[in-house]
């Protein structure tokens, strides 16, 4: 089964560095830097806004928890918003690619 992780980053360089690190470590097959995005969020009893760059990481469900934990550990924010979810559907070629990652448990299934 395939999976995705998402986190906002302070800038494109950070998003790309995080993506490179996860791919190099075998925790992801791909990372996409998306944006800039304008974030509006509740923070410390108030409303805040920031220009950020989104990072979408493609991985195998068997690696999702490790990928999320690694993103959180590497992220420069004190309390990064890192989310992950298992995909209900994936193209056969994508599922096989992500399932072939070292440590993946997907075996190429959707």
Image (cartoon, helix red, strand yellow):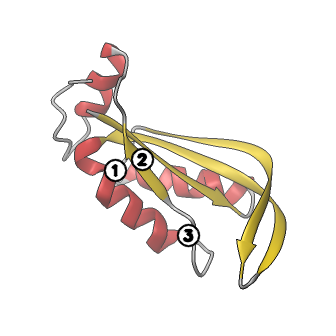
Residue 75 shows which numbered tag?
3
| Helix, strand or loop under label 2 | helix
In the picture, measured across the screen, residue 7 lies left or right of residue 46, that is left
Q: Residue at x 30, y 14 (%)?
A: 92
The residue indicated by pointer 2 is: 23
Query: Residue 18 appears at what percent x and percent y?
Result: 54, 57
| Helix, strand or loop under label 1 | loop
Q: Residue at x 47, y 63 (%)?
A: 71
Residue 53 higher or lower than 46, as above or below: above
In the picture, measured across the screen, residue 91 lies left or right of residue 36, that is left
Q: Residues within 10 Å of mark 3 (few under 14, many from 20)?
A: many
Q: Nearer the viewer, residue 46 or 55?
A: 46
Disc on the earlier residue, 3 or 2: 2
How far is mark 3 from mark 2, CA to CA?
A: 15 Å
Quarter in which the C terminus is drawn? top left
The residue indicated by pointer 1 is: 27
Name the mark nearer the viewer: 3 or 2: 3
Q: Residues within 10 Å of mark 1 (few under 14, many from 20)?
A: many
The part of the image, by quadrant, that contains residue 17 is bottom right
Residue 36 higher or lower than 41, as above or below: above
Quarter in which the N terminus is drawn? top left
How far is mark 3 from mark 1, CA to CA?
A: 15 Å
Q: Residue at x 60, y 49 (%)?
A: 55
Query: Residue 60 appears at what percent x and percent y?
Result: 30, 39
Check if mark 1's residue and mark 2's residue have beta carbons within 8 Å.
yes
Q: Residue furthest bottom?
A: 44
Q: Residue at x 30, y 58 (%)?
A: 65
Q: Nearer the viewer, residue 85 or 2?
A: 85
């Amino acid at each position: 089964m395939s999976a995705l992780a998402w986190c906002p980053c302070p800038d494109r360089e950070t998003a790309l560095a995080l993506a490179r690190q996860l791919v190099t470590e075998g925790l992801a097959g791909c990372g996409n830097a998306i944006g800039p995005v304008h974030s509006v969020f509740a923070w410390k009893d108030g409303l805040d806004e920031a220009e950020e760059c989104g990072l979408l990481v493609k991985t195998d469900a068997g690696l999702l928890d490790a990928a999320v934990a690694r993103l959180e550990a590497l992220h420069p924010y004190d309390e990064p918003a890192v989310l992950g979810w298992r995909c209900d559907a994936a193209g056969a070629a994508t599922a096989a690619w992500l399932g072939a990652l070292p440590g993946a448990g997907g075996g190429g299934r959707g």
